[in-house]
Amino acid sequence: MNTLAKQRRVFILVSLVIPVLLLVGFVVFPAVDLFRMSFTNWDGLSTTSEFIGLDNYISMLHNPDLWQSLGNNAVYFFAHLLMIPVELAFAVLLNSKLRGAKFYKTMVFMPYIINGVAISYAFSYFFSPINGAFDSILEALRLGMLSQNWLSDPKIVNFVLAFVSLWRYSGYHVVLFLAALQSVSKDIQEAAIIDGANTWQMFRYIQIPSIMLMVDFVLFDNIRGALQVFDIPFVMTSGGPGYASSTFTLYTIKTAFTFSNFGLASTMAVAIMVLIIVIYVIQNKIIHGVILKEDK
Amino acid sequence: MKKISRRSFLKVAGAAAATMGLAACGGSQSTTAASGGAAAGSELSGELVFTIWDNNLMEYIDSNDMVGKFQEKYPDAEIEVEKIKDDSEYWNAMKMRASANQLPDVMFNKPFTLSRFKDYLLDLSDTEAAKNNTLAAGYAVDGKILGVPMTAGYEYVYYWKDMFEEAGVEVPTTWGDFQAAATKLQDHFGASDPDFMAIALGAKDEWPDYPFMEFMPALVNGNGQNWNDMAKVDAPFAEGTDINIAYHRIYDLFTSGVFGKDPLGLGNDQATTLFAQKKAAIIALGDWGLQNIENGAESIDQLGAFYLPVRESKSEPFRYIVQGDSFMGVTTHSKNPELARAFIEWFYSEDWYPGYIAYISSASSMSNFPKDKDPVLAEADAAQSDGEMVMYDGGGDDFTAIQNEIAFDYKKLGAQMFTDGFDLDATLADLDTKWAAARAKLGIQ
């Protein structure tokens, strides 16, 4: 091995030391410890804990409130999933020579950069049953009969919260799609136009395949975000009434900090990791294998 | 020379908790002081961390130079006052610190957290502060005073006198009277204002129902040890038990329509503001709530207070809750426990405590520094001069263990009572089943 190659190897190794140490210290070790804790009955305070085998996993599977919370996560997941084509359409529209596109881009992205807790508080007042802006708008439009208990009716509360989540995150997805669309080669697009491709064919056969990596990322981000949603229900409803708007993460944190059951909460954290991976794999198979009919 | 510096930082952790362990979010600000000063005093020296959540205390500490005053007696002492956002966040932070051996030198507790942190607190029984405190001995754990309560906490029902007068309602002295008064107020004012609430309750936040859900079981028969006694039986929610009686009364009230059109849609801040604006006639809060009402009201000339009447008839004694609040204790993690004890002695001495207790609306817990109640709060005592105080215990080890095992959350249960289809009897029966199973599993006799 010549000197240059040696120096190169030394440089790479030295450069990797700190990132690897950080990764091991703050990701790998906590993840392993989380897994270990999931088999204990640690209460978060005691200096000792007992190994209780699979008790936490069995208890978790038999917890109806947790299942209800997970069901609520599904509302966020499907709401965001259904919005992805709309977000994509917005991105295509903003990528075209639209008058005022920059202004729209800024407006669309704005909700994402506002603090999530502030948004949740603002929407709490927006949907308030007394002096609430939304009910006032309905009244002004002579649609007062549509007024509901937006934050306390178990039948609709999750849809209201999912709407707030859409308001906040859709712009982020639009901007991601837009960035990807802008990176699509102009040469290929011009060649397609010369070959007679119409707008739909251009979108379906040129743009979509070119930005598939970003679509995959957004789909994964949707799963991760939907299963880990926390701030919006925490601030707007505290997961209530009862557990009607609780989510998996909200329930996990309550288990740990309110009921001092860190062992069980760790089990839930492990479960959510596994769930994210499983749902991603299934979703990937459906989208690539069934909808897009790709041969991977 | 004394030097005071401020620093603030925000700790944020969010949903990543689900995958990377369990994190919490909170905010803190702290005031530090370096040693110095020329005053003579003790040989004690070192650094102390004093962690609090109370905004009023923080304001008073800042504006009255607590650190400087302490250093006049202990010139070689350094104190860092660390402020956590609120008490919920406080317990999360303290739990994490306890497991990391990083508890502050001096911390606060509530009655319901004393038993949780008992292994981390030093015995203060021999301090003058504990001896002069009217409530400390009543909260001793295994015979040890682990915290000296800073205030005596009372619960009140605030009301607008002019609204009572207009609706022709008297201050109630029995539970039946209370329900009837609320109904009459709702009928009277609700007829012209569909948003009106006879009783304001921010049930969306769940915790504001505590004057009912937490304290009423103890008030039914005057048993401040109710939670602990429940831990001794398999069916504490069965018919005829204190909690069963209390929760049926609460359920009747909660479902009678006197909390307005959507109590679950409002948080405590909104409910308190609406009460202050006379969009509600009644609100149940602790003594601390008076300052919040004052801040939101144009005038409190017509504001009155009474104790929540829980008794069924006037032949029963009138009972009301008192509890020690903000139990100041020294932790086992303190590197300067003697200095920490000296700080507590100083805090409850004439050098500091009288000024502070005069500044806040809460009552004094010290026999050597009595305090007259605010005129609004004093009305409650005047109305029930022969009232019987019930000293509330937040629940010991056994109760807490069962509560955690079955995830019994009485505040959430109260909020659930407002939902359609809620079946109280079925819920209480289910709780009994879980309770018995938990006792068996945990080996609690």
Image: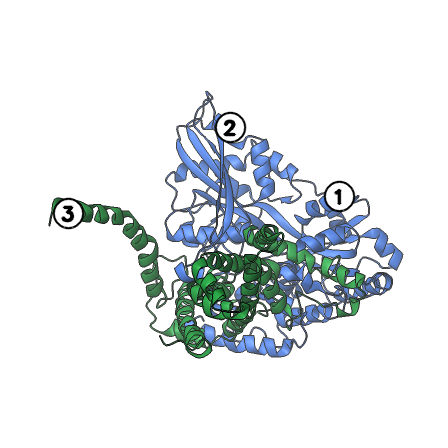
The residue nearer to you, when weighing A246 against B436, is A246
Query: For residue A242, which quarter of the picture?
Result: bottom right
- Residue B98: horizontal and vertical position, in percent? 40, 51
Q: Residue at x 59, y 74 (%)?
A: B237
Residue B336 seen in the current view: yes
Q: Residue at x 53, y 32 (%)?
A: B66
In space, the residues marked 1 and 2 are separated at their CA atoms by 33 Å
Q: Which mark is residue B375?
A: 1
* Labels 3 and 1 positioned on one and the same chain: no
Q: Residue at x 62, y 39 (%)?
A: B357
Q: Residue at x 38, y 53 (%)?
A: B99
- Residue A88: horizontal and vertical position, in percent? 53, 64
- Residue A266: horizontal and vertical position, in percent? 40, 64
CA neighbours of label 1 inside 10 A, class few (<14), some (14 to 19), many (20+): few
Query: For residue B20, which quarter of the picture?
Result: bottom left
Read off the residue under disc 2. Answer: B68
Read off the residue under disc 3. Answer: A6
In space, the residues marked 3 and 1 are separated at their CA atoms by 83 Å
What SS does tag 3 mark? helix
Specify the subunit that label 2 lies on: B
Front disc: 1 or 2? 2
Could you tell me if the residues under marks 3 and 2 are in contact, i.e. CB atoms within 8 Å? no
Q: Which chain is blue?
A: B
In the image, what residue type sits under mark 1?
Pro
Q: Colour of chain A?
A: green
